[in-house]
Every structure is written in C-alpha cells, then in structure tokens.
Amino acid sequence: MFKGHKKNSSQQEPLTQARVLEVLKQVKGPQKQGNIVDLGLVKDLLITDNKVIFSIEVPQELAPQLEGMRAAAEKVVSVLPGAGQVLVALTAQAQKGQSPVKPPMPSKPKAAAPAAPRQSKDALAIPGVRHIIAVASGKGGVGKSTTSVNMALALSAQGLKVGILDADIYGPSLPKLMGVSGSPTVGENNIINPHEAHGIKLMSIGFLVDDSAAMIWRGPMITSALNQMLREVAWGELDVLIIDMPPGTGDVQLTMAQRVPLSGAIVVSTPQDLALIDARRAIAMFEKTGIKILGVVENMSHFVCPSCGERHDIFATGGAKEEADKQAVPFLGEVPLSMKLREYSDAGTPVLVANPKAPEAVSYNAIARQLQPMLAMSKDQLARPAPKIIFE
Ligand code: ADP
C-alpha cells in the first residue's frame, strides 16, 4: 500500500502544495533526465490532516524498476516541516488506445467481443498467488461483498488457501464483515502483512485510511492504491485471491480489469430486471477486456419463511440464471434472501463461520464446489475460451 513515514508534525506551518512540488524537483525522472515535477509526472497531490498523498505517473514497462524513484520522492517530502504521513504511489501511464471506454450493452450473445482495451500484458502475476478472481456487480447493494466473503470461506473450508482484497474504496465492508479492524503491520521492505481471520488473508483500504480520506480520491489515486494493495502485501501462497470489486462498470473497474492479472470474474446480481441490466453491463465489461466470466451468482434469489419454512419467490426468481444462459456464461448458484445472513454479516461473523450447516451456508458451499474444477486449472487453461454455439 502506500508506504509512509509518520512523524510528529504538531505546531508546524501548514504545508503547501507549492512547497511539496518544490522539493520534488530534486527527484530525477525515470530516464534520469529532468525532474519528476517538470516532466509532469506528479499527479493527484493532496494534503490532508498532515498526510501528503500523491502519485507519480510512469511508463508501465518501467514501473518495476522505479521503486527507488518512488522512495526518493517519499523521502524528500517526509523531511519537510509539517509533513506527517507521506503516501506515494506509482501509477502507470495510460497507453495510447487504452483510454477507458464505456462498454455498450449487448442484447444477445455475440460471436466475439469487439477489439477493445484488453487485459494489459504488463498485468504481472503475483508470485505465490495461483488465481486472482474479481467478484463484481453492475451496481451496489446486490450482495457482492457478502458473496465474496462467504464464497471465500466456503473455498477455504474445502481446502483452498484463500485471500480477499476489498477493492471497494468508497465503501470498504471487509473489516465489518470479517470483524477485523486496525492497521496491519508492515514487514521488511515496507511490505504490508495482511490481516488474517477464519483462515483467510484480508486486505482492505478500510484498514489503512479512514473513509473520509478515500472519499476524495479520484480515479488514478484509486487505481494506484488498489495496485499497491495488490502488489505490496505479503499474500504468501494462495490458491485464490478474491477481489471484491467496487460496484459498477466505471473507469476504475475497467482499469482494474485491464491491469490486474485476473483469471476470471464472477458477477453477482439480484434477480430483478433492473439489476440484470447492470449485471449484463458488468459481463460485457469483462468480456471486452478479454477476461473470462467464471459465472453468475443470483443473490437474494428467494425467501424461505423462517417460521413456516416455505419458499417464496419474492422477485422473479431465476432471472440471473436466465441471463447467464442468454449470455452463455455459467450459472454458479443462488443464495436466498435471509435475515439471518444479514445479521451474521452485521455481527462480523459470516454464516459460514457462525453456522456452517445453515441453508445459506449450504448455498455458498455449492457455489464453491462449482468453482473448484475451474480453480484446479492453470490460469492459461482457464482463460481459454470455451467453444460457443451461436443462434441468431
Ligand atoms: P454490495 O457489496 O453489493 O454493496 P453487500 O454484500 O454489502 O452488497 O450487501 C448489502 C446489504 O445486503 C448488506 O446489509 C447485506 O447484509 C445484505 N445482504 C446481502 N446478501 C443478502 C441476502 N442474501 N439476504 C439478506 N441480506 C443480504
């Protein structure tokens, strides 16, 4: 994540952007010519509560070699009077032809996704992490985070080593859902040790900054924060790292789809028509970036009356399955609308932990079992498109 020095900065003159930029001129550019300020590489400079936050935009291919430059920038700022914590991130310059585009909504299966910003070649793998899977939704509130957490626990119960990265910068829910809070410790080379709960490694922006700080970040800041949460965390050996994506299909999501070495994506939807339109958009976004849709989960599918045990299809249940069939992507399973599920989540003890035999837990276990054969494949095998039969 953002690496940083913390110092006592009380009774100092407030630090100004001009002062920060002035000292940053001491830092040479990536090619050792010019300085990072005059080269226009310093972006998103923000000074808030003594924290100085900025990113340095660099060519993607040079990024792995530029940690020294990042550290130098951090150092020159951190010694300034009035600077508390200094958070510096490297961000990759957008390449020509990679500007985010809004995916159109397909109405029926297509033979092939049109040429579009594909997953970037420099989406370097994370050593030790076998698969990275995005859990996404077309809009917020459909149960994406609840699904990510319980699916992760189900996979873990089935013997896999699992981590979760909560990438929902504007509404991180992992700390609450897993009942974990506080800053993680920082190990050698400033690498963050993720929290661990119920056998799952956890990382969330909610562990690092308070909500108000993240709320004012703009797109590139978010992208660089996520990149660091992904790459500068000691994930260790994992069979799967689940990324709980920010809801929606905006630029941040698209950039992540392009730059994170994803093995595939899971789209969560509720069964109503409106949610399905959003889910379709999410599926389209991943397909355009060449990322395989591992499946669709229907959340809040039906309601089982706690007193009479009868099933009620409150919404038009089965909508997500129909949509998955229409889009020719797998349907992974359905999770009932359940007050218990929400209560467990609110208490920070997910249903898989609190009551692994509950019907809701059974649903997540079934979804995890559907995923298992896919996760047993290598990333390359998984990425290979299955043959599609197209009816016009
Ligand atoms: P998202 O990540 O899509 O924004 P969350 O997982 O945070 O959604 O869920 C939103 C709210 O809905 C939370 O209060 C959560 O407890 C509740 N919720 C999620 N899934 C279910 C479900 N199957 N039954 C009942 N409540 C649910």
Image: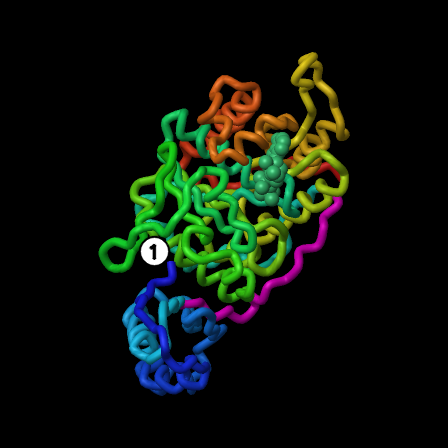
- The correct choice, above or below, for 26 with respect to 282 in the image is below
Q: Position of residue 241 (x, y in %)?
A: 42, 42
| Left or right of residue 105: residue 355 | left
Secondary structure mostly seen in the magenta stretch: loop
Q: Determine the residue positioned at 70% across, 54% down.
A: 104
Q: Tell me if residue 267 can be seen.
A: no
Tag 1: residue type? Answer: Glu
Mark 1 crowd level (few <14, some 14–19, many ≥20, 10 Å Cα): some
| Left or right of residue 159: residue 49 | right
Q: Quadrant of the C terminus?
A: top right
Q: Is residue 104 magenta?
A: yes
- The correct choice, above or below, for 359 with respect to 334 in the image is above
Q: Which residues are magenta?
A: 90-108
Q: Quadrant of residue 236?
A: top left
**Colour style of the rendered protein structure:** rainbow
For ligand 1, which image quadrant applies?
top right
| Left or right of residue 224: residue 239 | left
Residue with the mark numbered 1: 232
Mark 1 Cβ and ligand 1 under 8 Å apart = no
Q: Residue furthest left?
A: 188
Q: Quadrant of the N terminus?
A: bottom left
Q: Determine the residue positioned at 32% across, 53% down.
A: 192
Q: Quadrant of residue 181?
A: top left
Q: Tell me if residue 1 can be seen.
A: yes
Q: Residue furthest front?
A: 11
Q: Position of residue 205 (x, y in %)?
A: 45, 53
- The correct choice, above or below, for 188 with respect to 108 in the image is below
Which sits in the foreground, 381 or 37?
A: 37
